[in-house]
Amino acid sequence: MTSEELKNMDDTYVMHTYNRFPITIDHGEGARVYDLEGNEYIDFTSGIGVNCLGYGNAGWAEAIYEQAKKLGHMSNLYYTEPCAQLAKTLCERTGMSKVFFGNSGAEANEGLIKLARKYSYDKYGEGRSTVITLKDSFHGRTITTLNATGQDVFHNYFFPFTEGFRYAEAGNMDDLKNVMGDDVCAVMIELIQGEGGVRPLDEEYVKQVREFCTENDVLMLVDEVQTGVGRTGKLFAFQSYGIMPDAASFAKGIAGGLPMGGVMASEKVQDVLGSGTHASTFGGNPVVASAANYVLSVMDDKFLEDVEAKGKYIMSQIVGNVSPFVSAVRGKGLMIGIELAGLKNGDVAKSLMDRGLLTLTAGGNVLRLLPPLTILPQEIDAGLHVLLGLIGE
Ligand SMILES: *Cc1c(COP(=O)(O)O)cnc(C)c1O
């Protein structure tokens, strides 16, 4: 099939919910992907933070193949080893106590919200179901997580949304206190707002949110769907903020390219979702869990230090290349946002693609970089060459 044939077929039969870039992707190797004609692109997107080990990772593919031959799926009515092993590793490496597995980020965040509402219901009864989230946040595309998302553009068309959310300004403790009330059961935040523009929260603010939640016995929920699994140079971003959330969600990178999401619960709330209260047919699937076990086995301390160093290098190269088109560079590890001035982020992403570099956009006219965590120095330099060739002009 040629790229033209594929695009025509896709445009005819797949719903146009995505504004696709006009290229096809056929295969990949390391941090490079290739279209059906063999044209090469350096990938600074990793499938939106998913392909953390890059493309064509032999160990990852092997883990999937071996488990698929042995047991491809079994229901959660029975015990399977990869799922238990994965939960154990996640708990041991984070200090969390128990894990629930689902299939996506939005679903994981729904799990967080259910956990918080039930914690509160069990202890205080009805009327304490509101979750405070932050303005410019992003928590997913289900009817509930759209409303959890603190951006008006997402509160459209699909009425009625699940009620029970209020929004506070990110980084502003006074505003959080303003929207607080006795109907609140949780505060849910991203430590670095991803879709909202790669905006890291201030460490002091995050510590104050932690104290505020403890004082009011509301749960501190951290959405680590984008920041988790090594992306910021720690296994989870909360580990670099020196706080322990009551529960945290993960998805995107966890299985290195297969669909998985989930919830980690701290000791205090580990038993809140008891039998019959939550479930997922595919959750903790043995093949996907084996892929995730492989991903975590690769992410040792050295790997995570490298992620941090690579991120610092990329940011220093961009900052060092003084450009009238760059008004700010921020992020942590390999989650980097470049705020543009005088150029539209979408136009820049398109021009970069035409020059062989894939990038993402985010709110606030930001160009967002989420390269594979395994990206090599020469792949970074090849990508930066294209990037700085355009925005450094
Ligand atoms: C991507 C993302 C989600 C949604 O994840 P899906 O797997 O697309 O449902 C939720 N929260 C954050 C912070 C994300 O980046």
Image (spheres, helix red, strand yellow):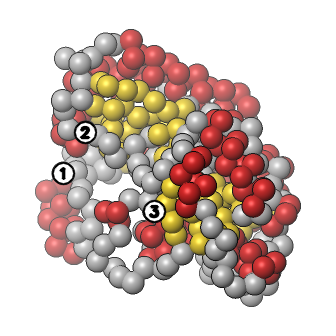
Q: Quadrant of residue 382?
A: top left
In depth, the one of 332 and 137 nearer the eye is 137
Q: Which residue is mark 2?
A: 345
Farthest-out residue, bottom: 276
Q: Which residue is mark 3?
A: 149
Q: Is residue 69 left or right of residue 190?
A: right
Q: Earlier in the sequence, mark 1 or mark 2?
A: 1
Q: Is residue 121 left or right of residue 147?
A: right
Circles 1 and 2, Cβ within 8 Å, touching? The answer is no
Residue 215 location, x and y as percent? 78, 56
Residue visible at 41% across and 27% down?
329
Residue 185 location, x and y as percent? 67, 69
Give the foreground label among 3 and 1: 3
The residues bearing labels 1 and 2 have C-alpha atoms spaced at a distance of 17 Å
- Residue 98 numbered mark, or none: none
The residues bearing labels 3 and 2 have C-alpha atoms spaced at a distance of 22 Å
Q: Element type at marker 2?
A: helix
Q: Earlier in the sequence, mark 3 or mark 1?
A: 1
- Residue 22 numbered mark, or none: 1
Residue 362 location, x and y as percent? 35, 45
Q: Is residue 348 above or below residue 60?
A: above
The residues bearing labels 3 and 1 have C-alpha atoms spaced at a distance of 29 Å
Residue visible at 39% across and 84% down?
160
Quadrant position of the N terminus in the picture:
bottom left
